Image (cartoon, grey):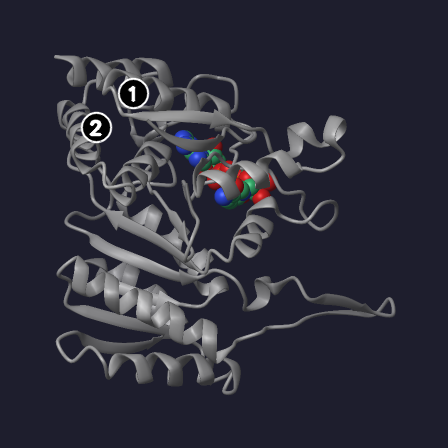
Amino acid sequence: MRVVTLIPGDGIGPEISEAVVKIFEAAKVPIEWEIVQAGAHVMEVEKTPLPRAVIDSIEKNKVALKGPITTPIGFGFRSVNVTLRQTFNLYANIRPIKSIKGITSRYENIDLVVVRENTEDLYAGIEHQIGDVAAESIKIVTKKASERIAKVAFDLAIKQHRKLVTAVHKANIMKLSDGLFLDCVRKIKADYPSIDYHEQIVDAMCMNLVMNPQKSDVLVMGNLYGDILSDLCAGLVGGLGLVPGANLGDEVAIFEAVHGSAPDIAGQNIANPTALLQSSILMLRHLNLSSYANQIEKAMMAVYEDGLYLTKDVGGEATLSSFTEQIIEKIIK
Ligand code: NAD
């Protein structure tokens, strides 16, 4: 049995995590969960949203599945997500965006991957107040992190038999920081002659994604553009309830949905567990448990194709638990 850390998180996190645990049980996945608590809900007792036990568990197990965690806006504790990424040097955030048959969304046949640099840019957390008249956030871009993320994007393109890598930037305005990012991607690109390479300014990229999303393949970019474009891309295939993510470093990997804790629907048994389930499928492939990943993915896709038990966010009326039960039925059949 492989031990994996499970952080249910805040808001809808516990409900959707429970769905994944039940589905893994039905598929007899050889994984033992080590459940640890982090997030806004542990603040009062632990005095921190990220207790030491959580860090220790991830350090030991090297792989974690994480539910969403609430971050206060404009005040309060630092984002647990950002802290985890920096603590474990999870420098690559991979977000596959793929159309699911059976979901009516604005587009069909989308199959792209957002590769987001995860440790620096405006998310380095270096901010200060200038008197009471201004505030400054520092955007850090280093050669090391830019070359590293470019390599991840090109390696992924090769591994997944993809054809095109597009670097997304704003180097026309941020000539030094985004200019350095682009120089680094160009340098790495030279090692991958079989992959086509484009560059696109981030605003034009947004328009092209909305007009012709099927033309995109692998998109590589800095932290902020990656954060924003991931949600945009989630919207192209049916919304935040569907899209998975992986945070990868050299030693540790944390898998999590793109969406947040969705406080507006928490505790109502109506959240869609697909994004976390798809993240757990990525996790199984990372752990070389692909046969289980394929089995669970097949069952989930079959429920979508049937179209009878879809959750509200994708146009259905099913509850979180009835959608989960349907997947389980397909697995044990
Ligand atoms: P959100 O993703 O939580 O919600 C945006 C909208 O999408 C809401 O209407 C919500 O109901 C819906 N939605 C999200 N996930 C869904 C699901 N699985 N099924 C059905 N509908 C779903 O974004 P927000 O409201 O901006 O953020 C809420 C909190 O989550 C904030 O504190 C934010 O900082 C945090 N957050 C955490 C993460 C993370 O832990 N990785 C990511 C993003 C936001």
Q: Quadrant of residue 230?
A: bottom left
**Residue linked to disc 1:** 23
Q: Residue at x 23, y 59 (%)?
A: 213
Could you say whether the residue bearing mark 2 is in a helix, strand or loop?
Answer: helix
N-terminal-most mark, 1 or 2: 1
Q: Position of residue 196 (x, y in %)?
A: 17, 76
**Residue linked to disc 2:** 296
Disc number for residue 78: none
- Position of the N terminus, as image quadrant, is top left
Locate residue 22 relative to residue 138 in the image: left or right: left
Whether residue 215 appears in this view of the structure is no
Mark 1 C-beta to ligand 1 under 8 Å: no
Locate residue 150 relative to residue 107 in the image: left or right: right
* Other residues around mark 1 within 10 Å, as few (<14) / some (14–19) / many (≥20): many
- In front of the other: 156 or 240: 156
Q: Position of residue 115 (x, y in %)?
A: 35, 61
Q: Quadrant of residue 189?
A: bottom left
- Position of the C terminus, as image quadrant, is top left
Are the residues flagged by discs 1 and 2 in contact, CB closer than 8 Å?
Answer: yes
Locate residue 97 relative to residue 129 in the image: left or right: left
